[in-house]
Image (cartoon, rainbow, N blue to C red):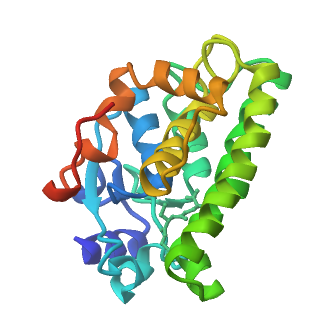
Amino acid sequence: MLEQIINCQNKRTPSPQCQRPILYTNYASESSWRVRIALEWKGIDYETRYINLATGEHLTEAYSEINPCRQLPCLITKTGKIITQSIAIIEYLEATYPERPIFPKSPLLKAEALSVALNIACDIQPLQAERVLNCLEIGGELRQQFCRRMLEIGLQGLESRLEKISGTYCIGEHITIADFCLVPMVFTARKKHNIDLKPYPYITKIRNTLMTLPEFRKSHPFNQPDCPQDKKEPVS
Ligand SMILES: N[C@@H](CCC(=O)N[C@@H](CS)C(=O)NCC(=O)O)C(=O)O
């Protein structure tokens, strides 16, 4: 399949394999979950290719032909074009599937939604990325402490921001791209780094409300076919 996609790209013409968008994803990838929520939210029929981060499949030459940055997620559009970066993919989905908009019309609210999304995607999440932690050459408990501290700093700032701008969801009463970033980040904090969310009542309340929605539950890591049985827990 990788070869077919690469050929499709090189020829710059759609191939039969590119008639539905294809998401390269991994159950444990926070950034991929953002896009899975967006695809579910928009009701887009898409195919999935699972890339195993644990075995380093994202670092292979074959995958780097698709995404030279060797990261997930990556979307192949139905016309066979490659889009990387979760926020860019979500913006593309919004532009091409305008039903159920996830960017507010008001310029100010749109800026606020993007500001929360980028705070998570650019400032908070990258500091738990394996490639960053590997470069720091810290392991064991020190590694966990670093991740937890960085997450706590991020969560504190976000909580104060949400106290001012949130309603039922991150940005008032409309579900936006900010919510698509919030829920996966909270999963990383709780499940991967054991962070207690009690000091963050706004984040907790919004996250719990969002997790009642089918789009967020269906796209949850534990509901992904590539999630190993021994890692699965009931979705809560
Ligand atoms: N800014 C990128 C971040 C992508 C990213 O960090 N992906 C992680 C999984 S969540 C990854 O591929 N990690 C592999 C690595 O860093 O080597 C996005 O939003 O798509």
Looking at the picture, does residue 191 appear above or below residue 132? above
Q: Residue furthest right?
A: 108
Q: Residue at x 41, y 83 (%)?
A: 59
For the image shown, how many numbered marks are present on the structure?
0
Q: Percent x, y for residue 85?
A: 57, 58
Instruction: Answer with left or right where residue 231 lies relative to residue 97.
Output: left
Instruction: Answer with left or right where residue 118 lies relative to residue 145.
Output: right
Q: Nearer the viewer, residue 9 or 106?
A: 106
Q: Please indicate, yes or no, whether residue 151 appears anywhere in the rendered image.
A: yes
Q: Quadrant of the C terminus?
A: top left
Q: Residue at x 82, y 20 (%)?
A: 164
Q: Quadrant of the N terminus?
A: bottom left
Q: Percent x, y for residue 125?
A: 61, 57
Looking at the picture, does residue 151 appear above or below residue 8? above
Q: Residue at x 23, y 58 (%)?
A: 17
Location of residue 162 by image quarter: top right
Q: Nearer the viewer, residue 53 or 176?
A: 53
Location of residue 94 by image quarter: top right
Q: Percent x, y for residue 114?
A: 73, 37
Q: Please indicate, yes or no, whether residue 112 appears anywhere in the rendered image.
A: no
